[in-house]
Amino acid sequence: ILPVYDYGEAERTPYLVMKYVPGGTLKDLITKGPIAPRQAAPLLRQMAEALQHAHQQGVIHRDVKPSNVLLQDGRWVQLMDFGLAKMMTSTSNITASGTGVGTPDYMSPEQAQGMPVDQRADIYSLGVVVYQMLTGDVPFHAETPMAVMLKQIVEPPPPLRLKNPDISPEIEQVALKALAKAREGRYTHALEFAEAYEFALDSAATLPTVQSPGGPTLPITPAIDQRRSPRLIGLGVITALAIVIALVALILSNNRSAPSPASVQVGAVLLDDFSAPTINESTWYYSSTYTTDLTVLSSATSLQNGRVTYNFDNLSEDYLDGGLRHEAPRPFKLISAKVTLLDATGFSDIGLEVNGLDDAPGSWAYLAMSPSDGSVSAYVGHYTETDETFTLIQGSGMPATHELAIGWDGSQLTFYVDGQARKSLPTQQIGQWVWLFFDAEPQGRLSGSFDDVRITYAE
């Protein structure tokens, strides 16, 4: 919520002093075209968090719309303009009885009729904002504001998929529930809306299946090419890494041990949404190839809002790389790994890595995002050999948020971005180690959040 620092009156003119936010508004972003469902998710969650906080204080915004959503640095929401806000406990109205308050394009049916409102009026308006983010248009148009308000009251909104066929049926249903005419049919709380949207994103992802050797058919998470060439600059670090991998216990930043064999089931999918208060030490441990200042990694890793977040400055003159690692005990083999990477900022890259391709300890496949422009690249290689680099998505300048996955079908390693296969390479088998990985440039800053990890193993 945009903070107000001061208020007063100067020469009989009232004024407010508010935070200055560079980066424009959500309206500015939408004018460039529809926003991809995956990229809309963090914006929706931030708006929902702001509204839920206001609702918990007994305040209804009553004018939620894209022009009232500032985007600091193009991605961090600042909800503003509570000028029409109403206290839920208030018995008075700032307008005459029977008069609607708000902006017609985003006004709930009860607002349009001048009826009493509660937090579900804001959820309706937020539903219109999501509708516009995904389709590039509001649900209703008419020649006059009054005619738009009438449509809000009586007409069902046009299905989102008529305007944007790329939207999944699951996402469409979530948005339409927020736009229910009767407020009893909507979400009760703003965060319930955001969580339903995120669940729909995950359930709508189409994953191929693979027949594991001697086992059942398993879901395979989409795979992505790996990007790693900046690391070749630090040749001394790379040489040391080949040795350190064999002694990984010596480079744990907080002396955590790898998970025991009992913690992994053959054919099972390891799920982690990072909703626990602390990182699960039986599943993940900190590991880094940068050994001169391990506290940089450990102190900058945290759990926030149900996500594991990296946020640090690399003060070194060399590359900093590492992250949270999961390692399956032999004879298990990795079948697939998938993760959602959110709100990445900074320079160099951050993403999903698997190690030990074809039982070669020094080999890796890395699906990485460059937060500076939102591009996604794949890197495959060996620590002592030249990388192969594949650009999968050109930078769009949008918030750096994607679903990344790497999967193996028995003969090919495939890289996926947002559920779509982008690159396949021949390989005998995929490795054992999964890393939520970062690779920061010297003197560079990097941050990003990981959520909804899915890892599948087989014998």
Image (tube, rainbow, N blue to C red):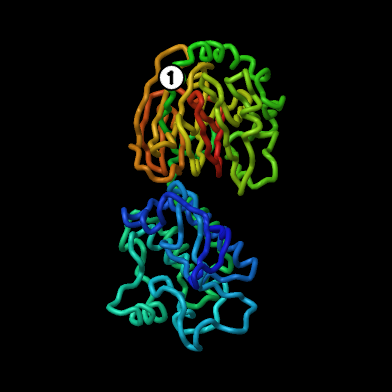
Is residue 145 shown above or below 402? Answer: below
Check disc 1 and give the amino acid type.
Answer: Gly
- Quadrant that contains the C terminus: top right
- In the rendered image, residue 125, in percent from the top left (x then y), is placed at 46, 69
Residue placed farthest to the right in the image?
255
Which quadrant of the view contains residue 284?
top right
Decide which of 157, 397 is in the foreground and name it: 397
Decide which of 270, 377 is in the foreground and name it: 377
At 54% across and 24% down in the image, what residue appears?
320
Q: Is residue 402 left or right of residue 137?
A: right
- Quadrant that contains the N terminus: bottom right
At 45% across and 46% down in the image, what residue appears?
73
At 46% across and 59% down in the image, what residue appears?
69
Residue placed farthest to the bottom in the image?
97
- In the rendered image, residue 427, in percent from the top left (x then y), is placed at 42, 23
- In the rendered image, residue 295, in percent from the top left (x then y), is placed at 66, 27
- In the rendered image, residue 221, in percent from the top left (x then y), is placed at 47, 39
Mark 1, residue position: 381
Which quadrant of the view contains residue 109?
bottom left
Label total for image: 1
Q: Is residue 370 left or right of residue 321?
A: left
At 47% across and 78% down in the image, what residue appears?
101
Is residue 279 shown above or below 47? Answer: above
Is residue 259 shown above or below 308? Answer: above
Is residue 371 shown above or below 242? Answer: below
Q: Is residue 150 left or right of residue 56?
A: left
Decide which of 379, 312 is in the foreground and name it: 312
Residue placed farthest to the front in the image?
11
Secondary element type, mark 1: strand
Residue 378 shows in the view: yes
Pointer 1 local density, CA inside 10 Å: few below 14, some 14–19, many at least 20: many
Residue 203 shows in the view: no
